[in-house]
Amino acid sequence: MSAKLNEAHEHCKAAEKFLKTSLLRWKPDYDSAADEYNQAAQCYRIARDLKSSKDCYIKASEMYKKNHSFFHAGKALENAIIVSKETSSSDEIYTLACDSSSLYQQHGSGDSGASVLDKAAKIIEENSPENAVKLYQQAAEVSSTESSQHQGSEYISKSSRILVKLRRYDEAVDSLRREIGFHQEAGNIGAVGRLTVAIVLVQLARGDPVAAEKAYKEWGCNCEAPEMQTIEQLLQAYDEEDRDSAKRALASPFIRSMDVEYARLAASIPLPEGIDPPPKATVRENAAPSYVSPNAVHMKPQQDSQEIESTYDEKKSEDEDGLC
């Protein structure tokens, strides 16, 4: 290890010499200095001095950039990310990834620029999911400019799943819409159908079944039979306030087979309140008897219609005699 450290020091000294000017060298030799710093970084890396390795890669990138070697400058920063993933903070890795991607794009290598963003996002996803979301979204944008819709959809899909995991549902809806757009441009209709189920679940998690129904109307034509059956059963259950039916729909085999973030989301979606049946009439104990007017005419329950008519005829006859 000490031999590699000594070799690294020698490369650093050589790099400093190339940066000095003299009567025979009127301007610094940035390209040669960058190569020396790059070799020094490799020696430090082998010697497990990762901090010094990262610093040398960053210096090499600066030298390449001054010489307008943007691809090599971006590659040097990408190497700096790899050697410092265990020692650098998430914010530092995020910044290095953005700078590296920018340099790759200046060179015209958009795919490499998106790839370095994806690598950095994977490194910081566990400790800093918010920054990882930003990197995945940037990677999707870079891929879309390179007409790589398939790769872009993969990047934005990772962003959508993290947002769902973080319960940032409003942003997750926007991300899912972008993901659907990527698949539509690529002609991947099957993926649009599956994402329709996902966006319906997210809208229900937001507590907005109306928006969920609108999403189904917008993209439901891309769904296959199992997907349509699941969504329609789910939306009908929320429309009818049927808790049991909603619970069965959310536990359907199709939803359980989705990506783990959406399957977990389905288990946490609030069920509809349900409509309680009207309470049964109850009799109060020791209640006072109902009031009955003394002027009310009581009839025996057994009195039939003939008796009623007979009584009416007798009363009418008496009234006529009185008039005479």
Image (cartoon, rainbow, N blue to C red):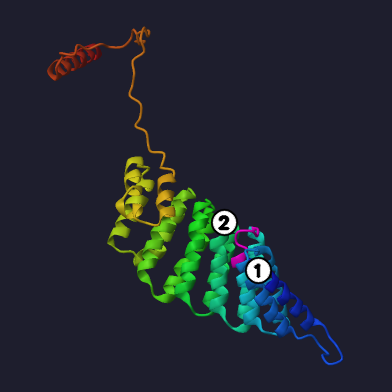
Residue kind at label 1, given as amino acid type: Tyr
Residue kind at label 2, given as amino acid type: Pro
Percent of width and height locating residue 310: 14, 16
Q: Is residue 86 visible?
A: yes
Give the tally of numbered discs. 2
Label 2 crowd bin: few (<14), some (14–19), many (20+), radius 10 Å: many
Residue at x 52% of width, y 75% of height: 143
Magenta stretch bounds: 81-89
**Position above or below: 159 against 273:** below
Label 1 crowd bin: few (<14), some (14–19), many (20+), radius 10 Å: many
Horizontal arrangement in the rendering, residue 146 relative to residue 252 (left or right): right
Q: Nearer the viewer, residue 244 or 132?
A: 132
Instruction: Choose top left, top right, bottom left or bottom right for residue 1.
Output: bottom right
Percent of width and height locating residue 271: 41, 42
Residue at x 21% of width, y 14% of height: 315
For label 1, the residue is 44
The numbered disc on residue 129 is 2
The numbered disc on residue 123 is none
Nearer mark to the viewer, of 1 and 2: 1
Q: Secondary structure at mark 1?
A: helix
Residue at x 42% of width, y 76% of height: 186
Percent of width and height locating residue 67: 71, 85
Horizontal arrangement in the rendering, residue 48 relative to residue 164 (left or right): right
Instruction: Choose top left, top right, bottom left or bottom right for residue 63.
Output: bottom right
Q: Nearer the viewer, residue 123 or 46?
A: 46
